[in-house]
Amino acid sequence: MTGVTERARRNLAGAEPFPPELWADTVYSRRAIPATLAAGHPAPGQTDVAEPDAYPEGRRLALAPPPLHLAPSPGPAPAGLADPAVLAALLHYAYGLLQHDLTPHGWPLHRAVASARCQYPSQLTLVAPTTAYRFDPLHHQLVCLDAEMGGGSAAEPSGCGGPAASRFAVITSQFARTARLYGDYAPRLCAQEAGMLLGAVHLVASALGLRTRPGQDRDTLDGLCAGRLPADEHPMGYLEILPPAERPPAGAPRVPAGLAAVLRARHSGAAIFDPVPAPAPRALLTDLGADLAAAPFADFSCHLLVQRVADSAPGHYVHSDGRLWQVRDGDPLALLERIGQTEGRVSMNFRSTACTAYIAVRRGSAVAAYGADAFRRLHLAAGAAAHLLCVAAARHGLSARVHNGYDAARAERLLGLAPDETVVFQVAIGAARPGAAFRLPVVF
């Protein structure tokens, strides 16, 4: 890999995916983003990185067509993954293809989770006692990763090796997919997306009556991935799939009515986020607060700079410890533009947004407890919360744009964060204008 930086070489080789300096290089500085990105050119030194093999060779199992609605199966207790419709719905609405752009030279295929430039480095794998199955969204199929396999189709739970017996959903990441455009900035984008995918699986599973236990533990994750990953793929997170419950357990995420339609409608807006300066409904703040309170992890706080929300005073709101309150009133535009100014310019049109969320994590205490692995853990927690914000926005017909164009040090100071807190997500919410792309839903 001539021309690849030493750190990129280590990342792509599977070693040190999150070195300590990543906080300074990708959270506090944007110098790791190559200047060629704006022109759509490959990052320096990345032209010789081969296209990763996202879907290895193996026996393929067809999935049932995903249902148009998400709800627990009828009966005394919800069905588990043994129900072909439940299995298909979980995979499709968590990470399947939901939208298709017909615009030439664009990013034509959009999945259920936001991704930087639609590179989609994350992979979703179901791990059963004797084998593992990777989800292929393009073909809506499962690919068996191990030599041993029981059963003849994904709809047939035969023995302990079929996908119906899966006990874990594992999220991994292929940094090379994103590094071709973003260079050394790729690990951060991959960590953000992995967290959002974890939040998506958690939410969809709850809508189907399934229970999941999200996990970050490194030893458990490595054990689930041992012998199953290509050399350039990194373990990121997992969710344990528990037996269905007759009623939603305490702490389960809120599932909005018509969630399938909401997920199909969710999008990040046009290439330049320039929303219509229209007020959002008051229910948006209520839903944001309730959804964040039910996020898979509690290791974050959320600062909302509210501009245009009906029956709500503009100002700075904070969500922490399960509740939302206002800490400062007044138009936050000047604050937004100071935080969102990088490299001498403002990265989006904050003058038209309804509100903007900043998700902060306690970096200092996490690094003290987990060392370099704190980067992965905290981005999983924040990413899961960010996906819930995006879904809440879509529920009210709004777009939510995850955008890293902000000054983290300035955000800490102006938002009044604790000394060890760091902003890792900026999510702008607004009413998107019609874009140039002609986008269609993907319907099986």
Image (spheres, rainbow, N blue to C red):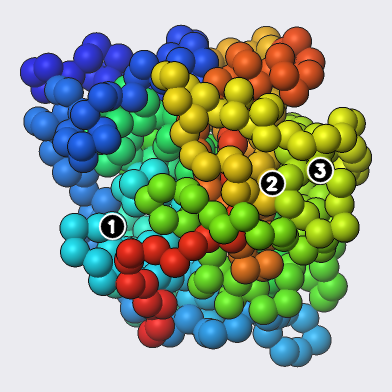
Image: 14 above or below 103: above
Quarter-of-image position of residue 321: top right
Q: Which residue is drawn at 43% across and 35% down?
A: 189
Q: Earlier in the sequence, mark 2 or mark 3?
A: 3
Label 2 Cα crowd, 10 Å radius (few <14 / some 14-19 / many 20+): many
Query: Disc 3 marks which residue?
Result: 314
Q: Residue at x 48, y 43 (%)?
A: 193
As measured in the structure, the alpha-carbon distance from the residue carrying label 2 to the one carrying label 3 is 9 Å
Q: What x and y, as percent, mark residue 441?
A: 41, 77
Q: What x and y, as percent, mark residue 163?
A: 47, 68
Front residue of this view, candidates 347 and 389: 347
Element at label 2 = strand
Q: Which residue is drawn at 75% across and 10% down?
A: 419
Front residue of this view, candidates 107 and 278: 278
Closer to the camera: disc 1 or disc 2?
2
* Cβ atoms at labels 2 and 3 below 8 Å apart: no
Q: What x and y, as percent, mark residue 126?
A: 47, 58
Element at label 1 = loop
- Label of residue 355 in the image: 2
Mark 2 belongs to which amino acid?
Answer: Cys
Label 3 Cα crowd, 10 Å radius (few <14 / some 14-19 / many 20+): many
The image quadrant where one finds the N terminus is top left
Image: 30 above or below 144: above
Q: What x and y, as percent, mark residue 345?
A: 45, 25
Mark 1 belongs to which amino acid?
Answer: Trp
